[in-house]
Structures are given as structure tokens and as C-alpha cells.
Image (cartoon, rainbow, N blue to C red):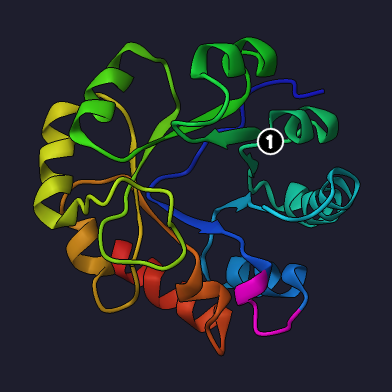
Amino acid sequence: MRATKKELTYPLLYLVTDRDLALGRPLLDVIARAVEGGVNIVQVREKSLSTRAFIEEAVAIQKYLKPKGIPLLINDRVDVALAIEADGVHIGQSDMPYPLARKLMGNEAIIGLSVDTYEELLEAEAFDVDYLGIGPVFPTTTKTDHKGFLWGVEGLRWAREHSRHRLIAIGGINEANASAVAKTGVDGIAVVSAIVSAEDPRESAYQLRQALS
């Protein structure tokens, strides 16, 4: 069981996995290289695996991350997060409602919530989430369930002015624009393809980490 909530070290360089973008490489290998480059939190996202396969994969990743003190979050699946005693879960607007997720996961779990619009960000002020995932910031092919709205750099500045929460920007962020995103006052950036599809995940993570410093 989790004894205490794992402390997050900001700014976060947040890796969201996608096996389909890993260029045929084992996902754990990509994660390991990314961690070497500076990733300090990992979210495992699986939309097509069976529950058993998802759990087996998450356990293997957890065994690698835990000794390094790097939090493991599960995307959407509160049941999987509970089953493996993950550090937390990330949920979207169409997933389990935050109050119920918190009730099930407990106060020591890290819970992040996606917000796709200004209205959703303001509504989230009522929740004691650990962070808000704001996106997409720029056009992206890895997040297709948004509402056709792009936050952009100015939108992130607005979010920083109107939210009391930690803010993690996601969507279309790469080495070329990460510095501009970081300067808006967000508490970290989350990436998928910028690391998972990189020829050298370690180097890409390192360059993104430098943009945050």
C-alpha cells in the first residue's frame, strides 16, 4: 500500500506512453532512456490492451520506476491503478468523475484531471486535484478527443492567472516550442511523440528538460 503521497518534483517533464508510436521498440526501453534524459513522471496510457496485459505491462514499468522514486500514473483506468497500487491516476472529462476517483484512490494518490476549455478549468477550481493537464496547446495527432479548441501560449497564460492548481501543458509540445510554453508559468510539460517517437528518447528528453530550466 502507498504509505504517503509521493512528492512531485517541479517542473515536471511528464511522459505519456503510446506503444504505437515507439517505432517498434519495447515500451520499457523507451521509458528507461527517457528517464535517463530527465523525465520525472510517467503515465501509462493503453487504449487497446486487455486488462490483464495492461496490468502486466504496468507492473513491469512500476518495478523500473519505483527504485528511482519516479511516480507512475495510470491513464483513465482507476481499477488498474488500484490493482497495482500505482502512485496515481490521470482522468479526463469523460472518465470517472473526480470526486469518485478520489474516494476510491484515497487522499494519498496523485490524481490529475484534463481540462480542454476555459470553462472546464474554472469548474476544476472546486476540486483538490494534484494538477490539471491543459491541452491541446498546439495541433497534435495523439489527442483526438478534445473539443476542437487549442490553448496556445496565450491560453496558457490565461490559465495561470485563473487557476490555483499546478498546471501541466500537453499537446504538440516539442523541442522547438517547449521553452515558450515553459515561460507561461506552467508547472511542467507532458509529451508523447516528442519522446516516444524520437530516434534517441534520452537526448530528446534532455533537450526538453533544458527548455524547462
According to the image, label 1 marks what residue? 77
Whether residue 182 sits left or right of residue 55 in the image: it is: left
> Which SS does the magenta portion mostly show?
loop
Quarter-of-image position of residue 133? top left
Residue 130 place in picture, x, y as percent: 45, 27
Q: Is residue 202 above or below residue 116?
A: below
Amino acid marked by disc 1: Arg
Count the labels in the image.
1
Quarter the C terminus occupies: bottom left
Question: Residue at position x 30%, y 45% from top?
Answer: 147
Q: In this view, does 164 lie above or below 10?
A: above
Q: Give the range drawn in magenta.
A: 20-25
Residue 183 place in picture, x, y as percent: 16, 57
Question: Residue at position x 25%, y 63% from top?
Answer: 138
Question: Residue at position x 51%, y 65% from top?
Answer: 38
Question: Residue at position x 65%, y 72% from top?
Answer: 20
